Image (tube, rainbow, N blue to C red):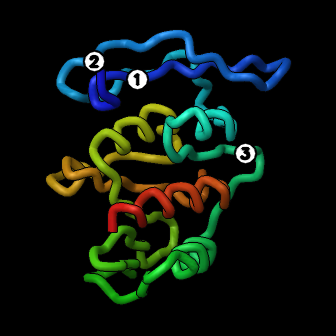
Amino acid sequence: MTGAESIVRVCANKNTGNYKLPDVDNVKGGALAAASCVPKTSVLSKNFIKQGFGPAFFVSETLMATASDLRRIALDLPGTAEAPHVDRTAFRVKRIYATLAADGLTANLKFTPDEQAFKTLLAPQIFSAIENGWGRQGWTTLDLAAASEADLKAVLEMAHAHA
């Protein structure tokens, strides 16, 4: 069973901060199923990454990433250049992996469709799929005000890996 066909349910034990990986659900059409035991503002531990489940995003109590945070973090990633793109600012290596809205309130990030489905299910208050063909390719809107700087860093690194 591949990641595209399944999702691991992650359940947090609030007293110890440990995470359980109790089961895997089959999913039709390659989309990820909702992880019903994950609170919308859960913190995924470093152990989750160490166990081979890939980059994770972190939602902390300190929210409110800004456009300047996005610009700073993106430009710190290897090979990234900033350039105008239609009515937005684009960040690219060989391909564009992130764009920042002119008002600085949202950013669009390039994920795989599976990564997009996972992010939008785990944190719908932060991530939403773009409602067109670009969205079907994995382009996802990030609400900067709802994200922490750690969230932003993690997702920019993930998007950068595809550039």
Which image quarter holds the N terminus? top left
Q: Residue at x 60, y 58 (%)?
A: 145
- Three-letter residue code for mark 1: Ile
- The local secondary structure at tag 2 comes to loop
| 57 horizontally vs 18: left or right | left
Q: Residues within 10 Å of mark 3 (few under 14, many from 20)?
A: some
For the residues labelled 1 and 2, say whether their Cβ atoms are less than 8 Å apart. yes
- Three-letter residue code for mark 2: Val
Tell me the distance, in whole angstroms, between the alpha carbons under discs 2 and 3. Answer: 29 Å
State the image coordinates of residue 52 (x, y, percent, origin top left). Answer: 52, 36
Residue reaching furthest right? 15
Question: Would you name the residue on which mark 3 appears?
Answer: 60
Tell me where residue 2 sits by quadrant. Answer: top left
The nearer-to-camera label among 2 and 3 is: 2
Q: Looking at the image, tell me whether mark 1 or mark 2 is earlier in sequence order.
A: 1
Q: Residue at x 62, y 69 (%)?
A: 66
Question: Would you name the residue on which mark 2 appears?
Answer: 27
Tell me where residue 21 sits by quadrant. Answer: top right
Q: Residues within 10 Å of mark 2 (few under 14, many from 20)?
A: some
Question: Would you name the residue on which mark 1 appears?
Answer: 7
